Image: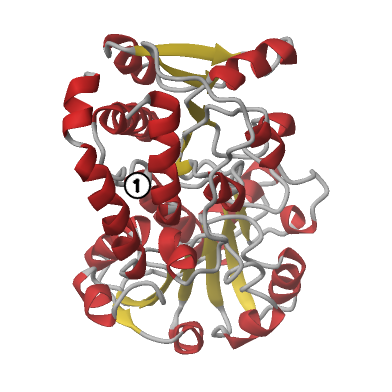
Amino acid sequence: MDRAYLEKHQETIRIGSATALERVQGAHTPATRLFAQNRYPRPIVLNDAPMTTWTSDLRVVRTSLWINPVYDQKMKAEPGIALDILDVKGDPEVGWKQLGQAHVYQIAATKDDLPKPFFAHQELIERCPNLLVVSSNGAGFDTVDAHACTRAGILVVNQSGGNARSVAEHTFGLMLGLSRKMIECDRKMHRTQALTREEVMGHEITGKTLGLVGIGQVGTQVAAVAQAFQMKVLACDPGVAPEEIRRRGAEPVSLEDLLAQSDVVSLHCPRDETTLRMMNAQRFAQMKRGALFITTARGGIHDEQALTQALTSGHLAGAGLDVWDQEPPPIDHPLLALENVYATFHTAGVTHEARHNVARMGAQQIIDWKHSLQMPPRCANPQAWPAHLARRKQILGF
């Protein structure tokens, strides 16, 4: 897109700013709910940092951590984009020089992969005066300080939905492995021949009640699969209207009713101030005795110590855990010592298909943003949009 075309469409910038605020007020998705409630600070523009003007290439920096090759292929095929690879194990000064020139930072979504100095926090933002967009490699953005980005007029975008099918499949893998005691049977068979089939006799999930805490893109996929098992699906999501929850295949209920009625409780909500340690001792006690607890959401939403007590007391029959406070968890973690815990290493969304989708979506979202004055479709901090437009014009010239 050339400068003449952009200057011709400057009015769109003004309209876009107003439209962005209207979108915030009407936001219903979990990712935007905090901004809609004005619980993140209003954006400000960084005026005290030196900024360069637009010359030719949009500079995109991604880390050397693995990403599906389709990302680089799409970026290199797009005229006007210069792609740099930040070697996270190399000379940090080289990395900082790359980031200092970057307009877009494609960042790892999980904290255990990326060295902390390269998290998109306040310190990094201060060293990157030209940064306009931080793009996560997944649906989450644990490595990004969204508050700081919003204050600086930097957009945070994710690839929500790109791995939804994979996460839904994983959820049912955990559910079936626990309900049919497959994981316990596997462990016993590796240790001994002295076992009976009755020891590992489980339950069908057909006809049971499934409670979804969060019914975004993943939760909706889980609800669809549950229909094939003739499960009754309940859902609690304060960011989704009751009629929309029904459209997505679940019956809207309160969290208290969901916990009390569900044979399986599965978390599919974001981690934020409203959900941190949401599943604590009191909430586990509200669940049906003999129920299963599953989470493919984020570590920290459930209290690991409280869950351990609920399992060892016999109140809960089992837990399928893909996310942890510390990833990977220590080998001597109490939950890993329990036979009725099905543990995976934050791999619910890690399939070849999902990684391809996420990489393709990530590259395309940046390419579309480069050519458009519209807010990206998966912007996690829409409140930053007006300040972002001002900084974009200052840095890129449009």
Identify which residue, 197 or 108, lies in the foreground. Answer: 108
Q: Please tell me whether residue 395 is drawn above or below residue 391 in the rendered image.
A: above
Q: Left of 45 or right of it: where is 165?
A: left
Asked if residue 162 shows in the view, the reply is yes
Instruction: Kindly identify the residue that appears in the image at 36 percent across and 26 percent down.
Output: 397
Residue 316 is drawn in which quadrant? Answer: bottom right
Pointer 1 residue: 378
Identify which residue, 348 or 201, lies in the foreground. Answer: 348
Asked if residue 157 shows in the view, the reply is no
Instruction: Kindly identify the residue that appears in the image at 53 percent across and 31 percent down.
Output: 107
Q: Residue furthest right?
A: 332
Identify which residue, 159 or 12, lies in the foreground. Answer: 12
Instruction: Kindly identify the residue that appears in the image at 47 percent across and 34 percent down.
Output: 132
Q: Where residue 53 sits in the image (x, y, percent)?
A: 45, 20
Q: Where residue 146 sits in the image (x, y, percent)?
A: 56, 50
Q: Where residue 2 sits in the image (x, y, percent)?
A: 22, 18
Q: What colour scheme does the image use?
A: secondary structure
Q: Left of 166 or right of it: where is 306?
A: right
Q: Left of 55 or right of it: where is 337?
A: right
